[in-house]
Amino acid sequence: MTAQTPSHLPVMYAQTLDGLRVRRDGRYLDGTFGRGGHAAGVLERLGPTGRLLLMDKDPEAIAEAERRFGGDPRVAIRQGSFAALAEWEETAAGLDGVLFDLGVSSPQLDEARRGFSFRQDGPLDMRMDPGSGECAAEWLARASEREIADVLWKFGEERMSRRIARAIVARRGERPLTSTGELAELVAGVVGRGDGDRHPATRTFQAIRIHVNRELEDVERGLAAAHARLRPGGRLVVISFHSLEDRLVKQFIARHAKAPPANRRLPEVRAFVPTLKIVGDAIRADASELAANPRARSAVLRVAEKLEAAA
C-alpha cells in the first residue's frame, strides 16, 4: 500500500478491516471512498473473484478512485451518496460487507477552497459535491433567523445558536458572508475566544455542513439500504465522528438487533425477529493511533452482522 501522510491515514484501519472480515471471494462496498485508505486494505484481501464497489459524493474522491483503482477488474466506481446504494445495479446481487466512514474527509478539510475549515480562509461552500445543491453562503444569504438558529442548535448543539443567527442576519444586511474566515470571525465575536483548544466556530461550521449536505438524512437512508443489501453473515461497519451520527447508528443497529421493551398495555402483535447481531462493543482509537492521527480522537466504530432471514 502507498505510504500516507498522517492527515490522510484511514481512521482505525486495522479495526475496520477486522470488522468487515473480508473474504477472498466476497463482495464489498465502501460508501465513503475519500482517498482510498480503507478500500486499498479491502483490495489487498480480495482474491481474483472478489468485488469492491466504491462510492463517494465528492467528484475529486471519485477521480482519485479512478486513478488508483479504475484499472482493476475487481472494482466498480460510482459518484453519488451511499444513501442511494440500493439503486446501484452492482449491489443487487447482495453484499458481504458495507463500510461508511462518515463526515468530512481530511483532504476536504485540508483544501481551503472547499470551504469546510475555519482554520484556512476560503469560499464559504461546504458541499461534498460542489456541483450539486446550495452552498453554505447561498443558504446563509436566504435562510430566516429562526431557521439558522434551529440548524445550529439541532446539528451543532450550539448553546448560543440564537445569538449567532441574529448576528448572521444583521451582518448580511450590510454585506453578504462569502468566506470561511468572515463566518469564523463573526461567530468568535459572539461566542468569545475562550481558553480551550476548540475553536469557537466549531459547532457552527459542523451544523451548517451537516445541513447543506443532508448528512443525517443520508446516514438514515444509507443504513436502511445497507441492511437491505447485506447477505446473511455480511458485516455493516460504520465510523462516526460526532454524537449525532453515532446515535443514529447505535439506534439503528439496536432496533434490528434487540427486541423493544414490552408494553403490558398493548397487545403483542408479533414476536420480534432480529435481523442484525451486534459484533463487540463500540471501538475507539488507541493512544498510538491518536498520537499519529489526531483526527481519530472523536471516532467511534460500530460493527453489526446480518442474520439469516426468518422462515
Image (spheres, rainbow, N blue to C red):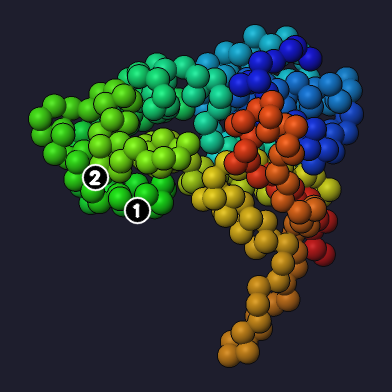
Query: Crowding at label 2, few (<14), some or many (≥20) Cα neighbours within 10 Å?
Result: many
Q: Quadrant location of residue 27? A: top right
Tell which of 96 and 289 is nearer to you.
289
Lateral position of residue 55 relative to residue 128, left or right: right
- Front tag of 2 and 1: 1
Q: Secondary structure at mark 2?
A: helix
Q: Position of residue 242 (x, y in %)?
A: 54, 45
Work out whether mark 2 precedes mark 1 in sequence or the reverse, and give the earlier one: 1
Amino acid type, mark 2: Ala
Tell which of 261 and 169 is nearer to you.
169
What residue is pinned by disc 2? Answer: 165
Q: Position of residue 90 (x, y in %)?
A: 69, 30
Point out the residue furthest to the front here: 195
Amino acid type, mark 1: Arg
- Residue at (89, 23) in percent of width and height: 47
Q: Position of residue 69 (x, y in %)?
A: 71, 14
Query: Crowding at label 1, few (<14), some or many (≥20) Cα neighbours within 10 Å?
Result: few
Q: Quadrant location of residue 122? A: top left
What residue is pinned by disc 1? Answer: 159
Residue at mark 2 to residue at mark 1: CA–CA distance: 11 Å
Q: Which mark is residue 310?
A: none
Tell which of 153 and 269 is nearer to you.
153
Q: Quadrant location of residue 89? A: top right
- Residue at (52, 16) in percent of width and height: 60
Q: Position of residue 68 (x, y in %)?
A: 69, 11
- Against 197, residue 108 (above or below) is above
Lateral position of residue 164 relative to residue 277, left or right: left
Residue 217 in sight from this viewpoint: yes
Q: Secondary structure at mark 1?
A: loop
Position of the C terminus, as image quadrant, is: bottom right
